[in-house]
Amino acid sequence: MPGKLPESLQQKVEERLRYYEDLGIRLFYRDRVAERRADGEFVSQVPTQQRPAPAQEISLAKLKAQMAAAAKVTPAPVIPVIAPLGPSLFDAMNKVQDDTLPKIVEEIGDCTRCKLHRHRNKIVFGDGNPKAELVFIGEGPGADEDAQGLPFVGRAGKLLTQMIEAMGLQRKDVYICNVVKCRPPENRVPEPDEVETCSPYLLRQIDVINPKVLVCLGAVAAKTLLETNRGITQFRGQWLEWRGRKLIATYHPAYLLRNPNAKGEVWKDLQKVMAELRLLAPKKKLL
Ligand code: URA
């Protein structure tokens, strides 16, 4: 009879199932996510309301019938692998774990991935302590940064340096970087395709540095990281959770150069950061 198990095999299966039944094992079913307790029992970690309905107890006769039916099903054809398999999840995790700032620099190389490369002089990767607890993220390099290959070294950069020092820190204690690594022409706001191309490198930098606190300087940095279109005034100075880290957005130093009255608000935001990082009281006040 087609699909029928050979007699000897049937007997073996039957014996094995009886053996299990004698041991009290009747349900051939286990939760997808289960943890072994100290007493050896498996306990499900899946909340009760999400658990699938328990399998029905199957009689030996029913099981035999199911096995015979399964034997009749034509097996799916084996599709030959004609393309190399992609990296496994394990490889991907290792890659992330092994990431370093020099590797990211190397990967960026002499980047031509977006149109910003056409006018740039130097790629501005970032600067500061590669293990900083505090990372400042700006928008993109200006003319001075483009010439020197360093972030925040122009007029706005000098103000940022004063802000950092007012917090009782030095530039070398923190890490400073930007959403885009090449200067947008005429210092225009980086365009969405430029942000999309460049920001994955920023995210990798942040993951490698692993800071406690991120300070977004201005709307471009805040909107990019938070993936929001809300105006910065709606959430400026509020602690936000970002990929397991604390993030606060404040005004960009270039905005403060044009609107010195806003310095008080920025100073309040920075004091929140200092409290979070348990930094000592500042020696001098923000100008
Ligand atoms: N403005 C920025 O956003 N970044 C810099 O590096 C300099 C000015």
Image: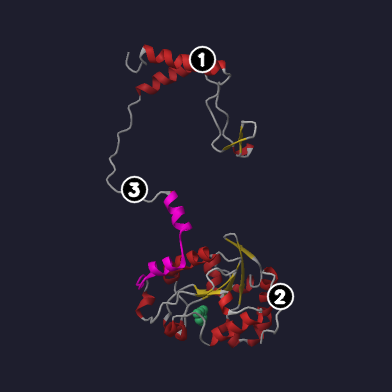
Can the viewer see residue 205 in this picture? yes
Residue 248 image-quadrant placement:
bottom right
Nearer to us in this view, 210 or 226: 210
Residue 228 as seen in the image, left or right of residue 101: right
| Region in magenta | 90-113
How crowded pointer 2 is (Cα within 10 Å; few <14, some 14-19, many 20+) is rated as few
- Label 1 to label 3, Cα distance in Å? 42 Å
Amino acid type, residue under disc 2 in the picture: Leu
Residue 184 x %, y %: 43, 79
Residue 202 within the magenta-colored segment of the rendering: no
* Residue 140 percent across, percent down from the top left: 48, 77
Q: Which mark is residue 280?
A: 2
Question: Which residue ends up furthest to the right in the rendered image?
Answer: 281
The residue pinned by badge 1 equals 18
Q: Which mark is residue 49?
A: none
Q: Secondary structure at mark 1?
A: helix
- Within the magenta stretch, is there residue 112? yes
Q: CA distance from mark 2 to mark 1?
A: 73 Å
The 10 Å Cα crowd at callout 3, few under 14, some 14 to 19, many 20 or more, is few
Do the residues bearing badges 2 and 3 touch, measured as CB atoms within 8 Å?
no
Residue depth check, mark 2 versus mark 1: number of the one nearer the observer: 2
Give the dominant element type of the magenta stretch: helix, strand or loop. helix
Marks 2 and 1: CB-CB under 8 Å?
no
Vertical arrangement, residue 53 with respect to residue 149, above or below: above
User: Is 218 drawn above or below residue 92 in the view shown?
Assistant: below
Q: Residue at x 37, y 81 (%)?
A: 119
Which numbered disc flags the more N-terminal residue, 2 or 3?
A: 3
Can the viewer see residue 59? no
Task: Find numbered disc 3 in the image and state the secondary structure of the residue it sits on.
Answer: loop
Image point (51%, 86%), residue name = 154
User: Residue under circle 3?
Assistant: 85
> Where, quadrant-wise, is the C terminus in this rendering?
bottom right
